[in-house]
Image (cartoon, coloured by chain):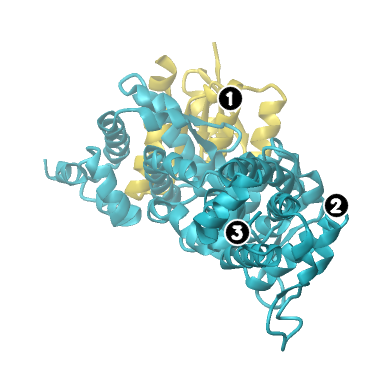
C-alpha cells in the first residue's frame, strides 16, 4: 500500500500536532490534549492502544513523548488514516471548548499549518485513503465555531467584569478624586440597572479596605444570570463610564483601556464580541456634548460661588431659555427642575447636539457667556479671565475652534 | 385691588418698617412677613400666593439664592416676580441677582424707591 510504516505515519503526524498546537499554547497542554483525544478514540480504534503519549513535563527524564508499538504496522493503513481524521475532529472539539486556546486566530491557520508541516507526501497519502485536509479545514472551522458558541455561553465573566471595573476606576482617577470616581461608577451602574438587571450582582464599596483599595465584588450570581447579548451589557457599561470622562481622558480612553486590560482579557472581550472601536467612535463624536457640559459647569461654578449652586442653575436655565429663539441648539439643553441643587447634573444635554454644526454651537455658547458677562455691572471685573482660567487650556482651545472668541468678549469691557 | 407682597426677611424690625410704610402708601399693598424659608413655604402651601416676593439673601436655614431656586421648582410659584432685597453689594451678587430675579435692591433703601420698583414690576 505505502512505503511508510503505519507507526511512522502516526508518530510523525502526532508530533506535528503537538508542535503546531504547542506553538500556540504550551507543549505540555498540546501533549495532554492530544493524549486525551487519542485515549478517547481507543474504543473505536483498538489499535490506538499501541500508541503511548506521555507528558514530558510530568514524566521528566523520558526522551520521547510518543512511543508506538511496532504491532501497529500490521493494521490496515486506511484504518490508521480514518483514526487520524477522527483525531483532527476530536482535537478541534477539545480546543474549541478550551479556555487556553485562542480559536479566533486558530481557525485560520490550524489546518494549513499542519498540512504545511506534514508536507506534500503525507497530504497525498492521506488523500489517497480518503482524508482531504482542505475539506477537513472547512469542517474544522465549523466545529470550532460551534464549540466556541458553547464556550461563550459557559464562559465565566465575573472576573473579567471585576477587572474591567477596576480599570475604569483607575482611568477615571486620572481626572477626578478617587471618592468621586467611586461615586461616578456607582451612579453609572445604578442608572444601567434598570436596563440590565444583572448589574445588581456587582457591589462597589464606598469605603476602602485595610489595603487602601475600594472593594469591587462581582458575585457568582453574575455568571449564572449572564445570558446572551453579553457584549451589549459590557459595551453599555464602558460607554457610560467613558461619557463621564473629560476631554483629555476621553481622547485616549479606549486605547488606555485596551492596554490596561491586557491580551488575555482582551481576547475574552473579542470572543464575547465587545466592540471597543465602536465605543471609541461614539465617545469621540460626543465632543460637543463635552464642551457644553464643561462650559455650563464653569459658569455654574462662577455664578454659584457668589450665589448658590441651585441659583446658578436656575440663572443659566433662564439665560438658555431667553436665547433659545435665537439659537435652536439651546433647546437641546434641558434642565430637570427637581434637581437644581445638583449643579451640572441637573442638565440633560441631548446627544443630538453632537450632530449640530460646530459654528452654530459656538455662536450659542458665546451668547450664553456674553449674556452672563453682560449682567456684571462692573465690566472691569475679570469675568472672562476667570472663565478662561477655570475651563483650562484644553477646553479653551476647543471652544475657540468652534468660534467662541473669548478674547473679543474680554475686549468688550474697554468699549 | 390690594396686592399681596411677601417679605422674606429675618430682621423683624425691617419687616415692621416696610409693612407699616408700604401699606400706608395708598393702601395698594398688603405685606406678609416670613422670617425664613420654612415660614415662607408654610404660607405658600397654605394657598397664600403673593403677587410679588421681596427676598433677603442672608437668611437662616436656606439662603435667598436657594429659596429663589426652590420657587422655580413649582410651576405655580415660578411666575411670582422676585426682588432681592439685600445688604450684599458686590458686583457679582448684584449682577447674577439681576440675571434671574426681577430686580436687585441693596440695603439700605428708600421706601419710596422700593415702592417705585415694585410698582414698575407689577404694572408690567
Residue in front for this viewpoint, A374 or A246: A246
Q: Chain letter for cyan, please.
A: A
Q: Circle 3 sits in a helix, a strand or a loop, which is it?
A: helix
Q: Which residue corresponds to the image point at 65% horizontal and 62% vertical from the top-left?
A: A9
* Location of residue A170 in the rendering, given as x and y in whole percent from the top left corner: 54, 63
Give the distance between the C-alpha atoms of the residues marked 1 and 3, in whole angstroms. 55 Å
**Pointer 1 with pointer 2, Cβ within 8 A:** no
Where is the C terminus of chain B found, in terms of image quarters? top left
Q: Which residue is mark 2?
A: A44
Relative placement, left or right, of A267 versus A361 is right
**Pointer 3 with pointer 2, Cβ within 8 A:** no
Looking at the image, the residue that sits furthest to the top is B1
The mark found on residue B22 in the picture is none
Q: Which residue is mark 1?
A: B77
> Do marks 1 and 3 share a subunit?
no
- Relative vertical location of residue B62 with respect to residue A215 in this rendering, above or below: above
The chain holding disc 3 is A
The hue in which chain B appears in the rendered picture of the protein: yellow
- Relative vertical location of residue A22 with respect to residue A64 in this rendering, above or below: above
The mark found on residue A265 in the picture is 3
- Relative vertical location of residue A163 with respect to residue A134 in this rendering, above or below: below
The chain holding disc 2 is A
Local packing at callout 2 (Cα closer than 10 Å; few below 14, some 14-19, many 20+) is few
Query: Comparing marks 3 and 2, which lies closer to the viewer?
Result: 2
Relative placement, left or right, of B22 versus B44 is left
Task: Report the number of numbered marks.
Answer: 3
Q: Quadrant of residue A235?
A: top right
Amino acid at each position: 500500500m505505502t512505503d511508510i510504516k503505519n507507526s511512522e505515519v502516526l508518530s510523525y503526524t502526532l508530533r506535528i500536532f503537538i508542535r503546531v498546537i504547542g506553538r500556540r499554547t504550551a507543549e505540555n497542554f498540546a501533549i495532554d490534549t492530544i493524549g486525551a483525544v487519542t485515549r478517547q478514540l481507543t474504543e473505536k480504534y483498538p489499535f490506538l492502544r499501541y500508541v503511548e503519549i506521555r507528558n514530558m513535563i510530568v514524566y521528566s527524564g523520558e526522551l520521547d513523548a510518543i512511543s508506538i508499538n511496532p504491532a501497529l504496522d500490521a493494521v490496515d493503513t486506511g484504518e490508521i488514516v480514518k483514526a487520524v481524521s477522527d483525531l483532527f475532529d476530536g482535537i478541534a472539539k477539545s480546543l474549541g471548548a478550551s479556555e487556553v486556546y485562542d480559536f479566533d486566530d486558530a481557525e485560520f491557520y490550524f489546518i494549513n499549518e499542519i498540512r504545511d508541516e506534514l508536507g506534500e507526501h503525507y497530504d497525498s497519502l492521506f488523500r489517497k485513503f480518503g482524508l482531504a485536509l482542505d475539506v477537513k479545514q472547512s469542517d474544522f472551522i465549523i466545529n470550532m465555531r460551534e464549540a466556541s458558541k458553547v464556550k461563550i455561553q459557559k464562559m465565566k465573566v465575573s472576573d473579567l467584569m471585576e477587572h474591567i471595573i477596576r480599570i475604569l476606576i483607575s482611568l477615571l482617577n486620572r481626572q477626578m478624586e478617587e471618592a468621586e470616581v467611586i461615586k461616578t461608577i456607582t451612579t453609572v451602574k445604578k442608572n444601567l440597572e434598570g436596563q440590565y438587571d444583572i448589574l445588581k450582582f456587582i457591589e462597589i464599596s464606598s469605603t476602602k479596605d485595610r489595603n487602601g483599595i475600594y472593594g469591587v465584588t462581582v458575585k457568582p450570581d453574575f455568571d449564572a444570570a449572564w445570558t446572551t447579548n453579553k457584549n451589549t451589557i459590557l459595551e453599555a457599561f464602558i460607554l457610560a463610564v467613558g461619557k463621564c470622562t473629560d476631554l483629555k481622558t476621553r481622547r485616549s480612553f479606549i486605547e488606555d483601556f485596551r492596554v490596561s486590560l491586557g491580551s488575555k482579557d482582551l481576547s475574552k472581550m473579542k470572543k464575547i464580541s465587545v466592540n471597543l472601536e465602536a465605543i471609541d467612535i461614539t465617545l469621540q463624536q460626543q465632543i460637543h456634548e463635552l464642551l457644553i457640559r464643561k462650559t455650563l459647569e464653569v459658569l455654574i461654578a462662577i455664578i454659584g460661588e457668589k450665589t448658590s449652586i441651585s441659583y446658578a442653575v436656575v440663572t443659566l436655565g433662564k439665560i438658555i431659555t431667553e436665547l433659545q429663539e435665537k439659537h435652536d441648539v439651546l433647546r437641546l439643553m434641558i434642565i430637570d427642575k427637581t434637581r437644581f441643587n445638583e449643579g451640572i447634573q441637573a442638565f440633560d444635554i441631548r446627544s443630538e447636539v453632537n450632530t449640530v454644526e460646530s459654528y452654530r454651537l459656538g455662536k450659542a455658547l458665546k451668547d450664553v457667556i456674553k449674556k452672563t458677562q453682560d449682567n456684571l455691572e462692573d465690566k472691569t471685573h475679570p469675568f472672562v479671565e476667570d472663565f478662561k482660567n477655570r475651563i483650562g487650556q484644553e477646553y479653551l482651545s476647543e471652544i475657540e475652534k468652534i468660534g467662541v472668541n473669548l478674547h473679543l468678549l474680554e475686549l468688550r469691557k474697554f468699549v | 385691588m390690594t396686592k399681596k407682597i411677601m417679605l422674606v426677611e429675618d430682621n423683624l424690625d425691617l419687616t415692621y418698617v416696610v409693612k407699616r410704610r408700604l401699606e400706608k402708601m395708598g393702601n395698594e399693598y398688603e405685606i406678609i412677613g416670613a422670617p425664613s424659608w420654612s415660614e415662607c413655604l408654610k404660607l405658600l402651601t397654605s394657598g397664600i400666593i403673593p403677587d410679588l416676593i421681596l427676598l433677603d439673601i442672608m437668611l437662616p436655614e436656606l439662603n435667598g439664592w436657594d429659596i429663589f431656586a426652590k420657587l422655580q421648582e413649582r410651576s405655580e410659584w415660578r411666575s411670582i416676580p422676585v426682588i432681592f432685597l439685600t445688604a450684599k453689594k458686590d458686583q457679582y451678587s448684584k449682577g447674577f441677582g439681576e440675571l434671574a430675579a426681577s430686580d436687585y435692591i441693596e440695603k439700605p433703601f428708600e421706601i419710596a424707591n422700593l415702592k417705585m420698583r415694585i410698582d414698575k414690576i407689577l404694572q408690567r
